[in-house]
Image: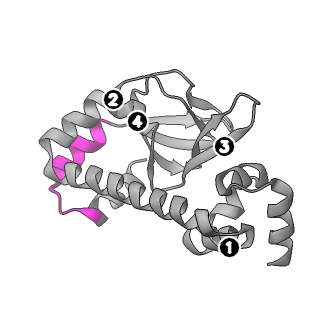
Amino acid sequence: MYDSLIRYIQSRAAIEKEQLDLICSRFSALKTKRNEILVRYDDICQHYYFVNKGCIRLFTINKEGIETSRFFAFEGSFGTALPSFIDQKPTFEYLQTIEKSDLLVISRTDFYQLVDTIPAFEMIYREILELGFITAQKRIYGFQGFNALEKVQWIIANQPQFLLRVSNKMAASYLGITPSTLSRIKSKL
């Protein structure tokens, strides 16, 4: 159950077995159904999730009821409603599993206790934040000048499993194009 998390940690930091055991002891297993909401709009996010199997997405819904996907976490990665998790204010988004998923979940209290006491875990958290920021910046700035085809090519190059695992509707909302445009482009590739 913890093998993927252990591999993730060991691939990013030198860590003693006792510390690794302590980290794992703070996570608990959570099995979810497809489309299960983990964090609702206006909730205060209290947990961080590691995806063993499946996928979670972060999305918003505008006043017209249109969903916009902002982030996806697949196997071997972390995900949460980060602004709410950090500042403990209500979130303006939803966190949802889009597939039947096996997650490891850690409370905010335990998460920050590990960040404060285990230097390797603090380094991993910093890496998660930095990589998340870089990916978001590349997506935002890259997409500003991209046409629809270039957006799809970017996602294929940077996240090859994305279009294979995510519905056209969710993928299109993430890319900022319509589902029909995405379907047309995919049929030509």
The correct choice, above or below, for 79 with respect to 128 in the image is above
Image mark for residue 68: 3
Sequence-wise first label, 1 or 2: 2
Residue at 17% from the left image edge and 58% from the top image edge: 15
- Taking depth in this image into account, of 91 and 113 the one nearest to the observer is 91
Q: Are marks 4 and 2 in contact (CB under 8 Å)?
A: yes
What secondary structure predominates along the stretch shown in magenta? helix
Residue at 71% from the left image edge and 69% from the top image edge: 147
Residue assigned mark 1? 150
Magenta span includes 114: no
Residue type at numbered disc 3:
Thr
Foreground tag (4 vs 1): 1
- Taking depth in this image into account, of 16 and 69 the one nearest to the observer is 69
Which range of residues does the magenta coloring cover?
Answer: 12-26
Query: Mark 4 to mark 3: distance in Å?
Result: 17 Å
Residue assigned mark 4? 83
Q: Circle 2 sits in a helix, a strand or a loop, which is it?
A: helix
Residue at 70% from the left image edge and 63% from the top image edge: 163
Query: Mark 1 to mark 2: distance in Å?
Result: 35 Å
Image mark for residue 124: none
Magenta span includes 16: yes
Q: Circle 3 sits in a helix, a strand or a loop, which is it?
A: strand
Sequence-wise first label, 4 or 3: 3
Query: Mark 4 to mark 2: distance in Å?
Result: 6 Å
Residue type at numbered disc 1:
Glu
Query: Mark 4 to mark 1: distance in Å?
Result: 29 Å
The percent position of residue 60, horizontal first and vertical second, equals 62, 36
Residue lying farthest to the bottom in this orientation: 189
Instruction: Classify mark 2: residues with Cα within 10 Å, few (<14), some (14-19) or many (20+).
Output: few
The percent position of residue 177, horizontal first and vertical second, equals 74, 56
Q: Is residue 115 visible?
A: yes
